[in-house]
Image: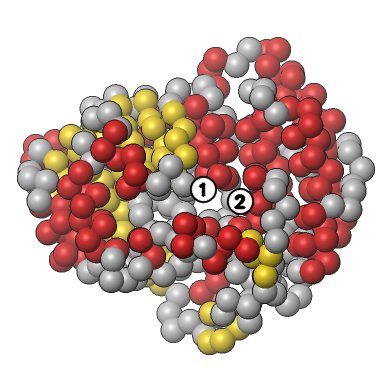
Amino acid sequence: MIKYLGSKRLLVPVLGQIFATSGATTGLDLFTGTTRVAQEMCRQGIATTAVDIASYSEVFARTYVELDAQALTPADHAELKQALARLNALPGVRGYITRTFSEAARYFQRANAMRIDAVRQAIETDYAGTWLYPVLLTSLIEAADAVDSTVGVQMAYLKEWAPRSFRPLTLKAPPLVPGTGRALRADVLDVVDSLDPVDVAYLDPPYNQHRYYTNYHVWETLVRWDAPEYYGVACKRLDCRDEATKSVFNKRRQMPQALAELIATVRAEVLILSFSNEGFVPLGELREMCQVRGGAVEVLSFASERYNGARIGVFNPHGQKVSRISHTRNTEYLLVCGEPQRVEAMTLNLQV
């Protein structure tokens, strides 16, 4: 999986235990991002709907949530292997990625940027409309992430090339997950009322001013393949300035009410809210929001390292460093809400 702000990689084992004891067969992963949590739901036999507004997230969900690894035949695996070998053998071409993210900016070394251009166009030309399309896009994004020169967000790139950026771009088969689900690209607030009731819902909303649309604009462009106009040192998509790409969850004054309404609206027997002590809403208020649903609310706390950028500093919209970070650790919360006995069973004997 790619480097991702707010990734729940370290919490997935705990969440897996919670899902396993939940008795759930249907689930929601709202704000699914890289789909790590949705994948774990699928592994636990939960038919999961993964929702996110990002185009790259939809691609991940189509690969890791919709596609059932157990349903693939030997012929399917051979077809994927052949496609990856063909794409890995393509010579590079100088296209939008090279001009924008290697020449105007320094996200990728030139040779890798040219390979990304060639591979991405071949995927569009030869595989659009096939089951391989999202799988190959996922492979390309993960391959590009493995040779980029950032700290994991795309608001800036490193002054000196990261050692990994010298490695050659290499596409690999994504580790597909058993179990079927559904990918839905949408604003959660627009669709929550229309989603079917589920046994368990997992919410991991943006909780402060950091916008995922701008933090991962390169992946958004790579998926859309729309060669957008850009601005600033970081070469962000011009539509990053549009109100339509700004989430209410990144606005301090509006976020608490939006979150409270979402928590109250989600139709699920058990709701699990993931949050951080660095968010706009303090823990006490989060607990009150969850108590509105009725039943018990159990709070689990985990100390964790902040994302890699915390070790480097804060950057302005032009990609220039403006200050240092004061701390490198934070606290992650999981609030588990539902019928008291069920919540107790899900949280009592966790191995952390």
The spot of residue 38 in percent (x, y) is: 42, 37
241 displayed left or right of 172 = left
Which sits in the foreground, 110 or 312?
A: 110
Which sits in the foreground, 91 or 191?
A: 191
Furthest residue to the right?
Answer: 91
Q: Amino acid at mark 1?
A: Ala
Q: Which element is circle 2 on?
A: helix
Asked whether residue 165 appears in the rendered view, the answer is no
Q: Which element is circle 1 on?
A: loop
336 displayed left or right of 121 = left
Residue pointed to by mark 1: 54
Q: How many angstroms separate mark 1 from mark 2 (CA)?
A: 7 Å
344 displayed left or right of 154 = left
Residue pointed to by mark 2: 220
Asked whether residue 91 appears in the rendered view, the answer is yes
- Earlier sequence position, callout 1 versus callout 2: 1
